[in-house]
Amino acid sequence: MRIMAIFAHPDDEIGCVGTLKKHAERGDAVMLVWTTLGELASQFGDQSHAQVTATRQQHGAWVAERIGAQHRFFDMGDSRLTAAREQSLALARLYAEWKPDAILTWDDHHPHPDHRATARMAFDAITLARIPKIVNEGRTQGERLEAHRAPVRFYQYYTKASPYPSVHVDVSGQVETMREVFEFYHAFYRWNFTAEQYLAQRALTGREAGVASAEHFQVRGTFAPATDYLR
Ligand SMILES: [Zn+2]
């Protein structure tokens, strides 16, 4: 299985670290994608874009290494995401190259516009990636990409507002990695909540599903082939 997690800013992935780690441990291919560098974080002060880029590349590499994932940054501009066609197309081309079976991203209702836009472009890119003439727009014969037409499961952070079915993933065995990644970002952002509070939240989510710790997602299937029976 190939899972691509797509978020707007470094740290957004904190809600799925356990799930990504668990899949990586199973031998699945995992890629973390950020659509922006999160360059508007106050911690960067007056640093240049080149300095911010270098720091974020370090952040991304550290987190991806802990999870056992590949990683990739786009630089679409913190607070500037619109889910316009060209932004979705950039993701679609990455789908065409990397061939994800599942996408994991933000929910559709989060207050931050970059989060909603990232969810929208991640979803739209599934369709764009299916169409050879779209993914190959402006590309030479030597650069041609193969459209990605396999079914893609679309997972999003759970929200009560969602009409879609949800799934809990048991991450009881990944708590230490979740703590490490949380502490890494905590040291940078100086959040006013602790790793204990973060893990307690995951434990509460686990209680909903009868396990010690869980992460919670909603799911949509797209372009799934016919099956013989319900499943
Ligand atoms: Zn964010």
Image (cartoon, rainbow, N blue to C red):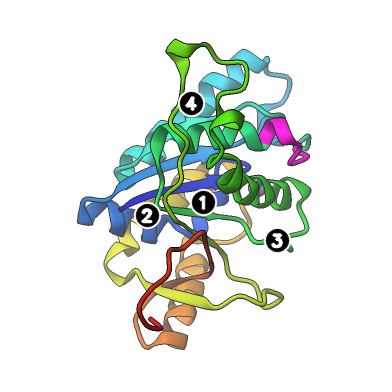
Residues marked 4 and 2 touching at CB (< 8 Å)? no
The first of marks 2 and 1 along the sequence is 1
Circle 3 residues within 10 Å: few <14, some 14–19, many ≥20:
some
Foreground label between 2 and 3: 3
Q: Which residue is mark 2?
A: 20
Mark 4 residue type: Gln
Residues marked 1 and 3 touching at CB (< 8 Å)? no
Q: Which residue is mark 1?
A: 13
Circle 4 residues within 10 Å: few <14, some 14–19, many ≥20:
some
| Residue found 43% across the figure and 64% down from its top | 225
Element assignment for label 2: helix
Element assignment for label 1: helix
Foreground label between 4 and 2: 2
Disc 1 from disc 4: Cα separation: 15 Å
Looking at the picture, how far across and down is residue 190, in whole percent? 60, 47
Q: Which residue is mark 4?
A: 57
Is residue 70 in view?
A: yes
Q: Which residues are magenta?
A: 81-87
Disc 4 from disc 2: Cα separation: 19 Å
The numbered dot on residue 108 is 3
Foreground label between 1 and 3: 3
Mark 2 residue type: Leu
> Magenta stretch: residue 10 in it?
no
Front residue of 21/175: it is 21
Residues marked 2 and 1 touching at CB (< 8 Å)? yes
